[in-house]
Amino acid sequence: MNLKNISKATLFSLALSLSLTSCNDWLNLLPDNEQVTEDFWQSKEDVESVVASGYYYMRKSVPTLIVWGELRGGDFYNQGSGYDASKLQDFDMLPSNSLCSYSNLYQVISMANSVLKYAPDVQGKDNTYYTSMMQSHLCEAYFQRAWAYSILVKNYKEVPLIVDAYVNDNAAMKLPKSSESAIIAQIKSDVKAALATGAAKGTFGEDWQTKCRATKWALYALMADICLWNHEYDECIQYANMVINATDAIRPAFIKDMSNWYEIFYPGLSNESILELYWDYNTEGSNNNFTSIFPESGAISGSKSGNCNFTDVAKEKMFQETTQVLVHNAITSLDQRVGRMYLATYAASLNWNGTQLTAGNSVALWKYRGTDVVDMVTVRTHMDANFILYRVADVMLMKAEALVMKGQASWEAAIDLINQIRNRAGLPDYLDLTAASKDDEINALDEYTLLSEVMNQREMEFLGEGHRWYDVLRLARYDATFAPEGTVEDNSSDDYESYKTTGMGEAVFAYKTKAIQLITEYNQTTSPMQLQSVLQNSWAWYLPLPETDITTNDKLKQNPYYE
């Protein structure tokens, strides 16, 4: 991230009419490649255009989000020899790797910082720019900045924390990294600031806006997410409940019917969606290019952006769930969707004889490809599926995970949420909470067993949605102190040498060991011995800062694993 370039970041200078209701009109804008200064901010349309540009850069970041979130988690792999994505999945990155780039996320932050700085001044220039409208824009900017930093902190642990608008060459361009705890504090502060305005919307004027712009539901989901990451379980549950227990007439709602699960992806904008990034070829004339990431069959290699093919372990787990759903629901033929699996999450040539499922090796991710026609032939005319950032099932499983980590007294509530997710998928209860033996069965559980079930449900529910790596990394972080106040720039830290070596807390981790075992079990492109050796150093779990930034910014120190 070259901060000087960010100071001249491309802003959208097209004045948008707020009467426009087409997503294409609002999102599909071309930058004018000119530096935007204070003179730009004259009307509410100017503010709206920069808010829109934040979502534009969020969309541009999606291919990276998918590869970051999937290739290290083990459900997908890239077969290209020597390509950047292969190096990512094998934890063999160099700072020169193109997948180290975080430029689009800092563009999101730059747009948000500009709105937060200049939108209030526009009120003095445009008497139709009402306070309620301005505060609504601030809420979206707070979300955009907080969301971008949540992705950065999960992938880099420590990055420069920029909260000022860089719009001229007089601004300081070189900043050191901030600690993980400082970044998380800023994320939480932004969410709380947005909610404190009272202007965070529950709905917008159009359905696509309600699902594709940051609402109060998106703010709640983001807060639950980062609190879980930070081991703040009570606060995670508090914000998750604001989504799960909402009573607003129009609100995100969990889709309970198994037969309706695929509506989340086709046509999209479902009741369950909290926030998704929007594509529509018919109005934009552009695809999201997901087919270059998820091949239709077999393996596609050679792309630096990475191609995601199902690993053998992931395929086996999908087939096992498919079999269980077929048996549990007495499904005798494969001419329909099978829960969240067959012709929903994936498509493959299958044979089912009533007790045994057999399949070939070619398996394609289907949630971004299929339509409402239930077969393996009918696909989207254009690859323009939306990319979902948060949905209600995600928030439910965040809460379940927090309940597990709070201790056995909370496990029944966690199991109830797990059962809801399983039942919607066509699976039987994990544990029958109506049975007389339920207390004994809960007492017989241990924390890792129940946490593993939460992770299993997240794995199967969100395949290809960019969550898996962060779930595995959270598992590794459940052992000890994981976010020391110091950074690698901070040589005064009491535990600096240990921090520089391991990146967190103690030298021996029970959960860290289990996470490494998961990674080595799934990975099919490098040796288990190599992975086990590399991943003992917790800094290897995070990405290196881009080489160009280290070269041009003498205040930055590299992630110590990559020095």
Image (spheres, helix red, strand yellow):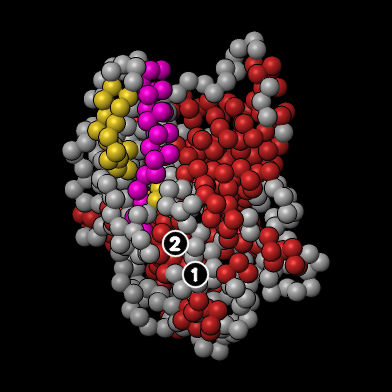
Overall secondary structure of the magenta section = helix
Q: Residues within 10 Å of mark 1 (few under 14, many from 20)?
A: some
Give the Cα distance between marks 2 and 1: 8 Å
Rendered location of residue 523, percent (x, y): 46, 48
Of pointers 2 and 1, the one earlier in the residue sequence: 2
The three-letter amino acid code for the residue at tag 2 is: Lys
| Residue 318, magenta (yes or no) | yes
Tell me the magenta residue range.
Answer: 305-329
> Nearest the camera: 241 or 505?
505
Asked which secondary structure carries label 2, the reply is helix
Residue 303 located left or right of residue 515: left
Residues under numbered marks 2 and 1 in contact, where contact means CB atoms less than 8 Å apart: yes
* Residue 220 within the magenta-colored segment of the rendering: no
Instruction: Tell me if residue 138 can be seen.
Output: no
Amino acid carrying label 1: it is Leu
For mark 1, what is the residue? 94
**43 vs 33, nearest the viewer:** 33
In the picture, residue 488 is in which quadrant? bottom right
Residue at image coords 41%, 28%: 320
Q: Residue at x 50, y 34 (%)?
A: 457
